[in-house]
Image: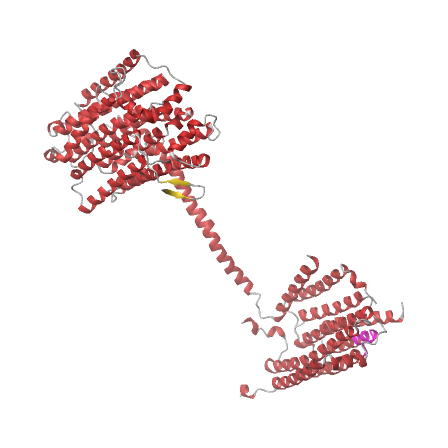
């Protein structure tokens, strides 16, 4: 498959994530949309890795695996982020009994 | 030694004394000395502090005038030129607690500044063309440059016209003459100094000094002659109806200066300088005499309240009469010789000049003897208190008067015309080297036939008879003058109001300038500049109040803005 | 159109469709389930690209661990559709949709100007994504980041515990 199919697919997923972040107000859904965007990026990284592997794999064998290791690390960071983020959401819910981000306008002051 | 020294511009601090400047030096220092002596008595009532200030200004005035006359180039002349302008301001506004006097001083200064600009532009023009303003270099360049390679005819005409603008400011010619009558605000000796020895003669001196330039610019010469003649006749008509003793003398000065410019305009440089000299004598005499009268009248200047002073102040009376005769052009007093020399030269150029000149001379005789008769003849019209106070002035005042009277009577004898005595015009012979180039140029290019002796004599006879008739008429009429309350009507009112020239200037120049200034102040300054300054503040204030709403604390809005920012960056990156 | 292409289109439509449903569905539980579907579709893409290791990790970590964590939280808080009241103003919602679709359009438009986008990707072939190769890279070149990521996990764990601990001092 040509790479532009993957690019369009990834950008579509990413844009859906953006729309979700922009339109939803439930903190958990926003969080999920962020995960969606991360995955879109991951998919694109893998696609590029395979594209470069096809062209330059014989000359630069580590080129393609670098990208996939990178995806691996993104997943690691995402997992850590989710654990902390969900803890924060739980705490917020415990304090204000809501997960509506519009309710959290402390940034105004 | 250089006054200004740069790579391409060098102005030397040069002095030059030749026949012309030595003559002026003698007039300035001689008349100036007499005025100083006179002032010691006249200003005695001032505080010692003001007295010292007065003499400091007076001496600065004389210094500036000497600098003007002795300078070896136009820049040094300009320093003196500005100096006399400053000193006239200081002295006219000497009694600065009176606002009218301050206004008069400002008027003199501003009028002079207008003229000075012309002078300065002429100097710049010379610099641009010749790279120097040294008299010797400039004049020899002009004389030798017959093909007009360096200075074209247009250059010369432009330069001389600008120089003449400068001269109209300093020497009170149309259109810048109105400051001189107002300059009466100063102490009377100052008026004498301004009118006789310094200041107003500066313009004459400058043109006489640059005579070769003016001779080579016939257009300018015509302008000078016409302006001089117009000033002479206009000022004379105004003087006819003035009642302030000093105002009459002031307008007579303007009128006499007009004659001098007529002389310069028709190429009679010697005549003009001659008239400067004789005028210095009799006008100083007249002003100092008027000062003596005012002193005796305890500051009264209105002639309608005088009269019959002959009995009380004999020395002032006799000397004043001699001065009047001299200015009226009665032979053999000095005014006769100088004025008739100018008129004879004017006749050669154009008989119409002569006709108008004689009309002016007639009026001069009339108003001077109106002044004389109203002041010294008839019976006293002032208050009883003033009459009681009347006295002859002290010696410090009368001695200068006597010396000046002697000069006014005999001063003309240095320039006896050829008609009466062969080789009698000593002054012409003396000034010959200064005007030699101009005379040669005139001879070579457009020589006028010399007047025959009979014509010259008949011209003189006409002018003398006319002046004498006016003199006798005025004497007769005003020695029986009675104070009336009847207001002036018709032409008399116009003349008494000085042809409404001040009002005209006020309406044409001052009012529009004031309204322009008011416009600039109220609209451009308040609304425009302040508007921009305050507007920036208000816009920032308003904008920040509006932009502050963006910081709603709503995460959604922030993210939206972030996405919009990313979009903009993408557009810039990909499409621009 | 071979099997690969069919699979590609199927997975793509599945991923995008379920992603739209994540955003669109009102219930958080449905959103989570649709997100899991999306992740499975993406894992399918990984398999198509022969990135087997990442496909497995994606399923285990994302669809398995993370999404289950999400479900736990949602269920713990007993969130349902009613917890999110409708938008007070439609303006922000429209703005969000327009901004997102503009982003998509912009990048697609930018792609058309680029000639390198027609390069092919390697499907079904290439052993770069196998555990064998990735493991070698990970434990040779990337061993230090790998070890540091364990520290990251430790700190995240401690952080989560600290944050979700009840702050007794404040309440009493």
User: A73 or B333: nearer the eye?
Assistant: B333
Judge left or right: residue B90 versus residue A107.
left
Q: Main secondary structure of the magenta part?
A: helix
Query: Quick check: can you spot residue B374?
Result: no
**Where is residue B426, by image quadrant?**
top left
Based on the picture, tell me whether residue C50 belongs to the magenta stretch: yes
User: B318 or B475: nearer the eye?
Assistant: B318
Q: Is residue B243 above or below residue A65?
A: above
Region of the chain picked out in magenta, as a range:
C41-52
Based on the picture, tell me whether residue B13 belongs to the magenta stretch: no
Residue ranking furthest to the left: B388
Judge left or right: residue B280 versus residue C63.
left
Residue ranking furthest to the right: C2
- Residue shown at the point (48%, 52%) measured from the top left: B532
**Where is residue B19, by image quadrant?**
top left
Judge left or right: residue B240 versus residue C69.
left
In the image, residue B212 lies at what x, y percent? 39, 27
- Residue shown at the point (66%, 71%) measured from the top left: C86
In the image, residue A37 lies at what x, y percent? 71, 72
In the image, residue C49 lies at what x, y percent? 82, 73
Residue ranking furthest to the front: B1
Q: Specify the quadrant that holds the C terminus of chain B.
A: bottom right
Q: Is residue B376 above or below residue B354?
A: below
User: C57 or C19: nearer the eye?
Assistant: C57
User: B152 or A64: nearer the eye?
Assistant: B152
């Amino acid at each position: 498959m040509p790479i532009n199919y993957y690019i369009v697919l990834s950008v579509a997923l990413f844009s859906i994530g953006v729309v979700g972040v922009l339109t939803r107000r439930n903190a958990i859904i926003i969080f999920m949309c962020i995960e969606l965007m991360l995955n879109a990026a991951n998919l694109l990284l893998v696609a590029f890795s395979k594209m470069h592997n096809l062209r330059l794999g014989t000359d630069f064998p580590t080129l393609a695996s670098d990208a996939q290791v990178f995806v691996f690390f993104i997943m690691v960071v995402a997992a850590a982020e989710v654990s902390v983020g969900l803890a924060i959401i739980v705490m917020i819910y415990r304090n204000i009994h809501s997960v509506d981000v519009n309710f959290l306008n402390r940034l105004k002051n | 030694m250089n006054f200004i020294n740069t790579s391409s511009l060098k102005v030397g601090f040069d002095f030059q004394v030749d026949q012309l400047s030595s003559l002026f030096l003698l007039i300035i220092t001689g008349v100036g000395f007499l005025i100083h002596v006179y002032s010691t008595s006249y200003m005695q009532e001032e505080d010692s502090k003001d007295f010292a200030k007065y003499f400091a200004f007076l001496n600065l005035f004389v210094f500036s005038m000497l600098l003007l006359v002795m300078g070896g180039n136009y820049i040094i002349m300009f320093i003196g030129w500005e100096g006399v302008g400053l000193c006239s301001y200081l002295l006219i506004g000497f009694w600065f607690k009176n606002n009218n006097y301050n206004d008069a001083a400002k008027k003199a200064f501003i009028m002079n500044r207008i003229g000075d600009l012309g002078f300065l532009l002429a100097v710049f023009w010379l610099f641009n063309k010749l790279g120097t303003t040294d008299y010797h270099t400039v004049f020899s360049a002009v004389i030798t440059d017959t093909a007009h390679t360096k200075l074209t005819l247009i250059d010369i005409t432009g330069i001389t016209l600008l120089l003449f603008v400068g001269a109209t400011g300093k020497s009170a010619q149309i259109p810048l003459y109105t400051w001189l009558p107002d300059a009466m605000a100063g102490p009377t000796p100052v008026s004498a100094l301004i009118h006789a020895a310094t200041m107003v003669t500066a313009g004459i001196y400058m043109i006489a000094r640059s005579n070769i330039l003016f001779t080579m610019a016939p257009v300018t010469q015509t302008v000078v002659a016409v302006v001089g003649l117009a000033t002479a006749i206009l000022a004379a008509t105004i003087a006819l109806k003035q009642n302030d003793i000093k105002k009459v003398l002031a307008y007579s000065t303007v009128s006499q200066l007009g004659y001098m410019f007529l002389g310069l305009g028709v190429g009679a440089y010697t005549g003009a300088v001659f008239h400067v000299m004789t005028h210095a004598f009799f006008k100083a005499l007249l002003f100092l005499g008027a000062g003596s009268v005012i002193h005796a009248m305890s500051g009264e200047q209105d002639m309608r309240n005088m009269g019959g002073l002959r009995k009380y102040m004999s020395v002032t009376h006799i000397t004043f009469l001699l001065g009047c005769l001299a200015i009226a052009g009665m032979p053999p007093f000095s005014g006769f010789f100088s004025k008739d020399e100018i008129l004879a030269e004017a006749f050669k150029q154009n008989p119409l000049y002569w006709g108008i000149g004689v009309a002016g001379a007639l009026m001069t005789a009339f108003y001077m003897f109106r002044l004389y008769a109203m002041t010294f003849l008839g019976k006293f019209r002032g208050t009883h208190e003033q009459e009681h106070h009347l006295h002859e002035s002290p010696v410090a005042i009368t001695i200068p008067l006597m010396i000046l009277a002697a000069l006014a009577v005999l001063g003309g004898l240095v320039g006896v015309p050829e008609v009466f005595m062969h080789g009698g015009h000593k002054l012409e012979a003396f000034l010959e080297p200064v005007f030699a180039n101009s005379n040669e140029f005139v001879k070579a290019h457009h020589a006028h036939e010399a007047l025959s002796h009979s014509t010259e004599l008949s011209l003189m006879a006409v002018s003398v008879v006319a002046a004498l008739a006016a003199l006798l008429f005025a004497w007769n009429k005003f020695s029986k003058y009675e104070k009336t309350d009847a207001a002036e009507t018709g032409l008399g009112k116009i003349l008494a109001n000085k042809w409404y020239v001040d009002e005209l200037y006020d309406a044409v120049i001052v009012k529009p300038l004031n309204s322009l200034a008011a416009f600039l102040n109220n609209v451009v300054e308040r609304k425009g500049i302040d508007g921009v300054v305050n507007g920036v503040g208000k816009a920032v204030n308003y904008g920040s109040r509006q932009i502050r709403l963006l910081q709603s604390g709503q995460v959604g809005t922030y993210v939206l803005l972030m996405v919009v920012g990313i979009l903009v960056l993408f557009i810039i990156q990909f499409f621009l | 159109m071979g099997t690969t292409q069919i699979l590609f289109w199927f997975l793509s439509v599945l991923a995008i469709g379920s992603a739209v449903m994540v955003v669109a569905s009102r219930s958080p539980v449905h959103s989570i389930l649709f997100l899991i579907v999306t992740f499975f579709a993406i894992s399918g893409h990984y398999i198509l690209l022969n990135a087997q290791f990442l496909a497995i990790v994606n399923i285990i970590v994302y669809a398995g661990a993370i999404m289950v964590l999400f479900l736990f939280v949602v269920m713990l808080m007993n969130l349902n559709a009613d917890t999110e009241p409708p938008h007070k103003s439609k303006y922000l919602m429209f703005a969000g949709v327009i901004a997102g679709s503009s982003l998509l359009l912009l990048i697609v438009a930018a792609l058309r100007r680029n000639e390198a986008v027609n390069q092919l990707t390697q499907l079904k072939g290439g052993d770069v994504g196998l555990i064998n190769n990735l493991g070698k890279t990970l434990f040779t070149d990337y061993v230090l980041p790998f070890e540091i990521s364990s520290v990251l996990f430790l700190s995240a764990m401690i952080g989560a515990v600290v944050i979700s601990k009840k702050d007794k001092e404040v309440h009493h």
